[in-house]
Image (cartoon, rainbow, N blue to C red):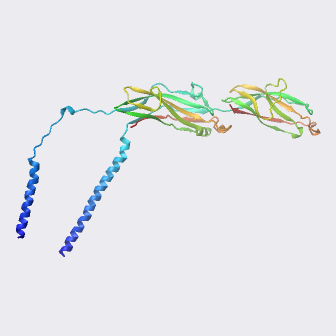
């Protein structure tokens, strides 16, 4: 009975010691974590200031318009080429390289063929069938282009008395 | 017999206690204050503030007189140059300067434009390109050049940003002590 009682008291002392160790370890760990967590924040000086500038920035535009359209061309026969000048203007905010982007014929039976050349049709410019025209247009500036219309020599009789609209698209690409 | 042993043990313990205490009480001790070592220690300082001179906008061509009338296009690089004064005092104090970018926001075409704009910054400290400084007496001018670049992609890629308007909020300049 006595030995069991002493054994029991001895056995109860160890858990108390363990609890103390655990408590000390917990306090130490909490303190260490707390110190580590805050140490980085307070270790160095720092400061900041605002630039104080709030502003608005607006994007520009690229815009091209036809200010003087070409005149109607009539009286074609196979092998004949006629020209009419037209004026375009850069209404945007950037310099534009002009390109002959596309052409659409209202009546394919007319069998017309169109090209575009830089300039106002002085002389007999041949023009380009597509792609760069070879002209850069500053913002706000205008320039003359030449629409060159040809009825090819090989056109057949189906073109007789035919008429067609010619819709030329000039593209301006930022230089 | 047991009483004799117990008595002896108790007596020995008493003597031991007395010996232990006697060591402490018997030793001489003394202390003195070193009056010459008394000193005041003062912490250094680190501050940054914008100069009173207004910032200047420019692009890759030159100064911009009125940013509100400016129209940004693909390929443009706007630069906002502003001088800040860094005050850094302290032995062995050194640090770096950095920029916390402002936000760029917009709606419609402006939102598209905002997506194309990229921010950056360069620094000149005391006339030398770089972002580091050391402690010195007086204010050290730090010229901050905050950039906004409108990259130029393939033809027509940025068309949806035409006419877009973005709001640029103020950016912040920060100084940070380094090791």
Q: Pick the residue in front: A139 or B4.
A: B4
Q: Residue at x 38, y 42 (%)?
A: A41
Q: How many marks?
A: 0
The residue positioned 87% from the left and 40% from the top of the image is A108
Question: A142 or A154: nearer the eye?
Answer: A154
Height in image: B106 above or below A3?
above
Which percent across, then down, holds residue B55? 50, 27
Image height of B136 relative to A107, above or below: above
Image quadrant where one finds the N terminus of chain A: bottom left
Give the quarter of the image for residue A82. top right
> Is A88 situated left or right of B141 in this image?
right
- Dividing the picture into quarters, in which one does residue A101 lie? top right
The residue most toward the right is A157
**Residue A129, above or below B62:** below
- Where does residue A25 sit, x and y in percent of width and height? 30, 56
Image coords of residue A29 (percent x, y): 32, 53
Quadrant housing the C terminus of chain A: top right
> A19 left or right of A40?
left
Which residue is at a point 30% across and 54% down the rendered structure image? A27
Residue B78 in the image, given as x and y percentages of width and height: 57, 31
């Amino acid at each position: 009975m006595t030995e069991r009682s002493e054994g029991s008291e001895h056995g109860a002392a160890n858990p108390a010691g363990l609890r103390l160790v655990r408590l000390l370890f917990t306090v130490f760990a909490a303190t260490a974590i707390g110190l580590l967590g805050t140490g980085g924040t307070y270790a160095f000086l720092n400061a900041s200031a605002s630039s104080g500038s709030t502003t608005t920035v607006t994007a520009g535009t690229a815009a091209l318009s036809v200010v003087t359209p070409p005149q109607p061309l009539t009286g074609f026969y196979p092998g004949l080429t006629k020209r009419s000048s037209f004026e375009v203007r850069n209404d945007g905010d950037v310099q534009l390289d002009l390109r002959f982007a596309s052409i659409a014929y209202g009546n394919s039976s007319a069998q017309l063929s169109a090209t575009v050349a830089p300039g106002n049709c002085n002389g007999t410019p041949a023009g380009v069938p597509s792609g760069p025209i070879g002209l850069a247009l500053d913002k706000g500036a205008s320039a003359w282009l030449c629409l060159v219309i040809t009825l090819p020599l090989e056109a057949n009789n189906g073109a007789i008395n035919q008429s067609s609209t010619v819709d030329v698209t000039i593209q301006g690409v930022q230089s | 017999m047991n009483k004799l042993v117990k008595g002896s043990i108790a007596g020995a313990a008493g003597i031991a206690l007395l010996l232990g205490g006697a060591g402490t009480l018997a030793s001489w001790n003394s202390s003195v204050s070193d009056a010459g070592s008394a000193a005041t220690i003062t912490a250094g300082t680190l501050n940054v503030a914008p100069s009173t001179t207004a910032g200047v906008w420019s692009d890759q061509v030159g100064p911009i007189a009125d940013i509100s009338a400016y129209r940004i296009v693909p390929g443009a690089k706007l630069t906002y140059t502003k001088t800040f004064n860094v005050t850094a005092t302290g032995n062995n104090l050194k640090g770096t300067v950095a920029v916390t970018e402002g936000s760029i926001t917009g709606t419609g075409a402006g939102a598209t434009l905002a997506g194309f704009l990229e921010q950056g910054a360069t620094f000149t400290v005391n006339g030398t390109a770089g972002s580091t400084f050391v402690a010195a007496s007086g204010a050290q001018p730090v010229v901050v050049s905050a950039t906004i670049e409108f990259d130029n992609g393939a033809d027509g890629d940025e068309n949806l940003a035409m006419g877009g308007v973005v709001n640029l909020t103020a950016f912040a300049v920060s100084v940070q002590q380094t090791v």
